[in-house]
Amino acid sequence: MNVIIRIAKFGKPYKKYLFLAVIFMLFNTVFEGLSIITIVPAVDKVISGNPVALHTSVPVPFLEELNGFLGYLSKMDRMKVFEYICLFMLVMFIIKGIAYYYSRLYMEMLGQHLVKDMRAALFNHVESLSLDFFSKGKTGALMSRVTADIQVILNLVSGRFANTLIEVPKFFIYAAIIIIIDWKLVVALLGLPFVILPIIIIGKKLRKLSKVAQHHLADLNAILFEVITGIKIVQAFSMEKTELGRFVKQNITYYKSRIKAVKLDAILNPITEITGIIIGFAIMLFRVPLIISGELSAGTFTLQIAAVLSMVKPLKTLGKINSMLQQALGAADRIFEILDIKPTIVEKPHPAILQPLSENITFQHVSFWYEKNDRKDAILTDLDFSIKRGEIAAFVGPSGAGKTTILNLVPRFYDPQEGRIMIDGVDLRDASLESIRSQLGIVTQETILFNETIQANITYGKTEYSTEQIEYAARMANAHGFIKELPHGYDTIIGEKGVKLSGGQRQRIAIARAILKNPPILILDEATSALDSESEKLVQEAIDHVMEKRTVLVVAHRLSTIRHADKIFVLDKGKIQDCASHDELLKCNKLYQKLYEMQFGMAVGSTQ
């Protein structure tokens, strides 16, 4: 019930559509019931030629007027009555058709609005989650929740659902007709528990199976996403058959889970239909002797049977509605699982607004480990250092030493478990995230570009920059030259992840983006490590431009790119082993000497 309430909250702003849809559903149902009550006695007149009237076992409003109309028909020629029946049915179907159209339209509008808002809320929440969330899950599986699971919910609150839902009030109309004609027939409704109980039991199992199936679909989408994004490696290693096997295996798993759900769902239809037919047969056995004895007219009997048999479809629909509901609730469970995840990086109620860096960045006894680890597996241990405004600080060390982790702590992508990180004496946990990150320009080894124009990637959502400013940033990044050679210049669409550009070109676009932002603090994480020599030279020149008059934190695999840094921190196993200039470290730090010799293939003494 809690899940249903949460779904309903998304539809609350659009309740007028639900109200209108229900009104038109009722119109549709009432006119169908009216047509049955009126037409059957009239048909009795056409067939038998006898005067007809509608007799009920309980008081009914407008019964006298209705019988007056039927009496009027009784005086008419049979053929004339038949013509009136045809005209009446045409009018009824036109009214029902109009009511059906608007009921479906308004339900579809409700459904589309609801899932639109739910999808936006999910996207907005995912954007707010901390990096540790994304490091745990699969991108494709997350995308499946935003797309496939939302679509399942749409099936519940849409025009297609209206087609099904419209049958529910018909059940009550037909039940009312049965009771009105002869209240003794209410005994036929005693068979309903044999229909409803299986629907409830099967529905609960169906929800669980549907949730499992959606999980398997998410895993299938995750494999698809991984293969598409890594297709170059897949083909380079001739792993197409292996990946196909992995996909087929998961595809079969998903298929089996869906078949289990379908088998269970398919049982509902026969159960409701057979039960409905049994009820109809019971009424026939009970009423046929009355026809033979003349106590019951053929028309009234036909009306009773028509009402009972007409209840079969709504009963079948009830099972279908429950099936759709349980599948939607299973999908909603998965969506709300994401919406219920709280970001680990949160602002305080009234955070401080950091001003541009004026003094220093300070790490005070900082230790950090990932959530699944504990202190003995710390990535960083008791780091204590300070970087002054305008200094270039480099971090070197073997793989796994914690270099990139340090850079990830400065934008507050993560919080340290121990110690604190400060900018101008303000603990980052006391500052607003926007005021922290607005001071930072970040260029990483894995360049993040979007399937937009080059200009849009350089400005990245900002509209206040002039063409001159954009081109200046591109020139400083050594990018203006190759951009002007492209067919559409700065308006060239570069493809997903900038696939239409070379690695060096993508990196220079990222640097131009950082230059245009003009941040006081620059973070460079292996910005040139994946480039060839020519591209590295151009990118390094661009980096030199962007580093001017800024505070820079840099991780570089190639020591030659950081030899002019003011401070070089040598890290090993999460601890700072030493801090000095390039020349000083070459003289006295064995780890730095080893890294240098491994990179350049010569002893340190031979460089002197």
Image: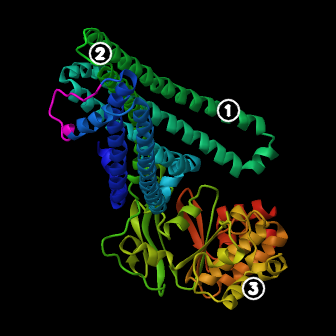
Q: Is 57 part of what is drawn in magenta?
A: yes
Kindly state the secondary structure of the residue where label 2 is placed: helix
Q: Mark 2 points at which residue?
A: 283
Which residue is pictured at 53% across the width and 29% down the height?
Answer: 257
**Label number found at residue 248:** 1
- Res. 568 image quadrant: bottom right
Q: Which residue is drawn at 55% across and 84% down?
A: 520
> Could you say whether the residue bearing mark 1 is in a helix, strand or loop?
helix
Q: Which amino acid does label 2 sit on?
A: Ile
Q: Which is nearer the N-term, disc 3 or disc 2? A: 2
Q: What type is the residue that disc 1 sits on?
A: Val
Q: Against 259, is 331 above or below?
A: below
Image label count: 3
The earlier-in-sequence mark between 1 and 2 is 1
Q: Do the residues labelled 3 and 1 touch (CB within 8 Å)?
A: no
| Residue 367 is inside the magenta segment | no
Q: Nearer the viewer, residue 166 or 210?
A: 166
Magenta stretch, residue numbers: 51-64
Mark pair 1, 2: CA separation: 53 Å
Give, as a three-letter code, the residue at label 3.
Arg
